[in-house]
Image: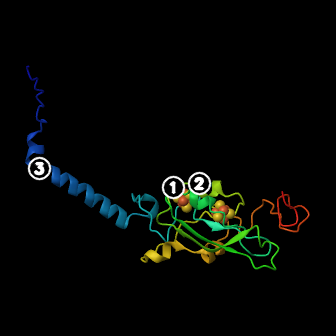
């Protein structure tokens, strides 16, 4: 059986390219031109693509998601009922929740839980927004318009419940416009201990 051989021609270079020195001089010339222009020219004439973060910040698009926040009820407690839908939906498995029961004298005791611990590893998060979509209570949102502040410590990117509840939305509030029907409230449409199936 015959073997076909494809011959690849060597790229053709001119003598000046082959000698490299003129090309190196051209590259250095470009670097020096940019250096002097960016050092001495006025701000609007500079050719710099980088931003001097954090002093200078780009304006984010309106639909930029931003880091998470946990929304509040009117009494300041978390809307989250620790159902684990968000952590189940999370493809990066970066949400850790420890559910707990309310005290027996709390009207929410017996059918609704709260997160004793709620931690998001923001460095593992891929900002897909699935947690927000999965939440049945509008308890977790990515409408802060903020990104994580820089830090050299890994632990600073583990956002716990208190941190997540301290972050406001773009509108400056910790609440959401969606109504929340509390147990005992006559508008409550669901099941509680007095109104079973
Ligand atoms: S945005 Fe996506 S990756 Fe990040 S916590 Fe939510 S579900 Fe997980
Ligand atoms: S944030 Fe929403 S989805 Fe996640 S545990 Fe709380 S109530 Fe469930």
In the picture, the quarter occupied by the N terminus is top left
The residue shown at (35%, 67%) is: 39
Residue beneath label 1, please? 91
* Identity of the residue drawn at 76% across and 67% down: 111
Element marked by disc 1: loop
* Quadrant field for ligand 1: bottom right
For marks 2 and 1, the one nearer the N-term is 1
**N-terminal-most mark, 3 or 1:** 3
Which residue is the site of mark 2? Answer: 130
SS of the residue under disc 2: helix
Image depth: mark 3 or mark 1 in front: 1
User: What is the CA distance from the residue labelled 3 to the residue labelled 2?
Assistant: 53 Å
Q: Is mark 2 within 8 Å of ligand 1?
A: yes
Quadrant of residue 9 in the image?
top left
Label pair 2/1, CB-CB below 8 angstroms: yes
Pointer 3 with pointer 1, Cβ within 8 A: no
Residue found 82% across the figure and 73% down from its top: 107
Cα distance between the residues tagged 2 and 1:
8 Å
Would you say residue 50 is visible in this rendering? yes
On whether ligand 1 comes within 8 Å of the CB at mark 3, the answer is no
Ligand 1: does it lie within 8 Å of the C-beta at label 1?
A: yes
Mark 3–mark 1 Cα distance, whole angstroms, equals 50 Å
Q: Read off the residue under disc 3.
A: 20
* Labels 3, 2: front one: 2
Q: Secondary structure at mark 3?
A: loop
């Amino acid at each position: 059986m015959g073997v076909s051989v494809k011959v690849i021609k060597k790229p053709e270079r001119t003598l000046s390219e082959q000698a490299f020195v003129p090309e190196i001089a051209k590259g250095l010339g470009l670097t020096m031109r940019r250096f002097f222009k960016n050092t001495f020219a006025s701000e609007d004439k500079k050719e710099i693509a980088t931003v001097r973060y954090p002093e200078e910040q780009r304006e984010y698009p309106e639909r930029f998601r931003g880091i998470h926040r946990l929304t509040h009820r009117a009494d300041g407690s978390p809307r989250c009922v620790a159902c684990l839908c968000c952590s189940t939906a999370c493809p990066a498995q970066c949400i850790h929740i420890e559910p707990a029961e309310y005290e027996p004298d709390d009207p929410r005791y017996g059918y609704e839980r709260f997160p004793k611990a709620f931690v998001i590893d923001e460095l593992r998060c891929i900002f897909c927004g699935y947690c927000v979509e999965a939440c049945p209570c509008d308890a977790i949102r990515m409408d802060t318009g903020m990104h994580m502040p820089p830090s050299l410590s890994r632990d600073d990117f583990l956002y716990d419940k208190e941190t997540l509840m301290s972050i406001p939305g773009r509108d400056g509030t910790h609440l959401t416009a969606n109504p929340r029907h509390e147990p005992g409230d006559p508008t409550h449409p669901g099941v509680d201990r007095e109104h079973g199936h």
